[in-house]
Image (tube, rainbow, N blue to C red):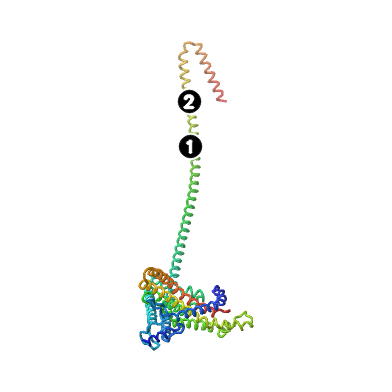
Amino acid sequence: MGGAHCKSPQGRKLAPTQEYKLLAKTYGLLQALTSAEESGNGFHAPSIMEFYPQIVAFEGTVFALNRIMIIRLIVVAVLLVVFTLWAGRVRKAEKAGQLVPSRFQLMGEISLNFVRKSIAHEQLGEKDGDRFLPLLTTIFFTVLGMNITGIIPGFNIAGTSVIGLPIVLAAAAYVTFIYAGIRKHGMGFFKASLFPAGVPPVFYILVTPIELLSTFILRPVTLALRLTMNMIAGHLLLVLCFSATQYFFFNADGIMKAFGAGTFLFGFIFTLFEMLVAFLQAYVFTLLTTVYIQLALADEH
Amino acid sequence: MITSVIKLAAEATKNPLIPEPYDMFWSSVVFVILLAFFWFAILPNFKKNLDARADAIEGRLAAAEQAQAEAAAKTANIEAEQAEARAEAAQIREAARAEGAAILAELKELAASEAARLTATAKAQIEAERQSALVSLRTEVGALAIDLASSVVGASLQNDKIAAGVVDQFLADLEAGDKAGKK
């Protein structure tokens, strides 16, 4: 707790510059993507259209389903099934008076405790950590589950690579940290956020707009963008590597075919990297949400 | 053909930062389902279960601790009893030794007195025997003297002169002895 308090002011100062950079990068990526064209010759260059697959049902309505939406629903189903099985196993063990948890039980406990202890309790303390645990757990497992489909053969695209879900999660985080602040400090929360103590009043002309931008606009925007852009970039990299492999192996002639091995190796390495990114993004999203809540709850801003 | 190309071209400018309505809809559905699931189905049981297990483990630990304390107390009791018994035994041994010493001293004393008594009796007996020996010696000496005398007398009766001298001497001695005895 103490450490988080000490770290937070520095983090707040750093955050805007990082966020501007992220936005700039995003813009560059978008430019590159939207100008990408089909290059023919059998080489399928990845484009932004990867993320708008064909609508398979309910076209034209809000219920429209495409491949990515279906993947999301499958992930939800898998999460429900796995955790329900886990809860059933726990209940059974409890009824049998079995104190030593089985391997499956322990795995669930470790992952739930990762959010509870390492993220929530670490930043918020035990009481507040448990208060906001449902949201934090949901965010963590949703992001992790949706991210990991990016490297699962057959799915090959992350459920979080389309911005809707990151927006919903970021909105939930946004609403929650503002709720936490208002609940704790009333309207004093906005005053403390926008007019930080210890700053000469003259500087509020400069500080207040920056604080407004960084706290109430950039925080949710960067949460959503960081996740989406990571997943989009990861997917495009994998598509690029594997479609190049395909091209080199089957369409190129002679020595050029050898390049395919290189691009395949890159694809393999990036697949492993994406595994790390999937976990890391889930962790970062959850941790930042927790930190925002912690900052809102903190007594002195 | 042309329309599909145009459509493709139009779609190619899609902005990934602007969500489609269906995207928002399904995202919300996903989020709400999972939030409700974790909030109401998984986490309450999770916390309850962890607490229950912690309680159970703590309870068992406490019970074990109590059992251990009891065992330790029992051991201490037994040790104390043993020490007591040992002390008692030592005491008894000490008392026995003292008693033995007393008995030994008494016996020694008894033996000494007995020895003294025996010595005294023996001395008395020896004295008595000496007396009786003296008495019997005296009578025997008398008889022997008489025998000797008679034999001497018998042998020297021929020599009247010596015989008359001895008899006279003897008689004189006897007379002297009588005189001393009368005195």
Of the 4 image quadrants, the one containing the N terminus of chain A is: bottom right
- Would you place residue A270 above or below residue B140 in this image? below
Identified by mark 1, the residue type is Leu
Upstream in the sequence, badge 1 or badge 2? 1
- Would you place residue A107 above or below residue B37 in this image? above
Q: Residue at x 51, y 84 (%)?
A: A179
Q: Which residue is mark 2?
A: B137
Of the 4 image quadrants, the one containing the C terminus of chain A is: bottom right
Element carrying mark 1: helix
Q: Mark 1 vs mark 2: same chain?
A: yes
Relative horizontal placement of residue A80, taking residue A32 as reference (left or right): left
- On residue A183, the disc is none
Query: Where does the image place residue A119, in percent across and percent down from the top left?
Result: 48, 74
Q: Which residue is mark 1?
A: B118
- Residue A2 in view here: yes
- Would you place residue A103 above or below residue B94 in this image? below
Host chain of mark 2 = B
Identified by mark 2, the residue type is Leu
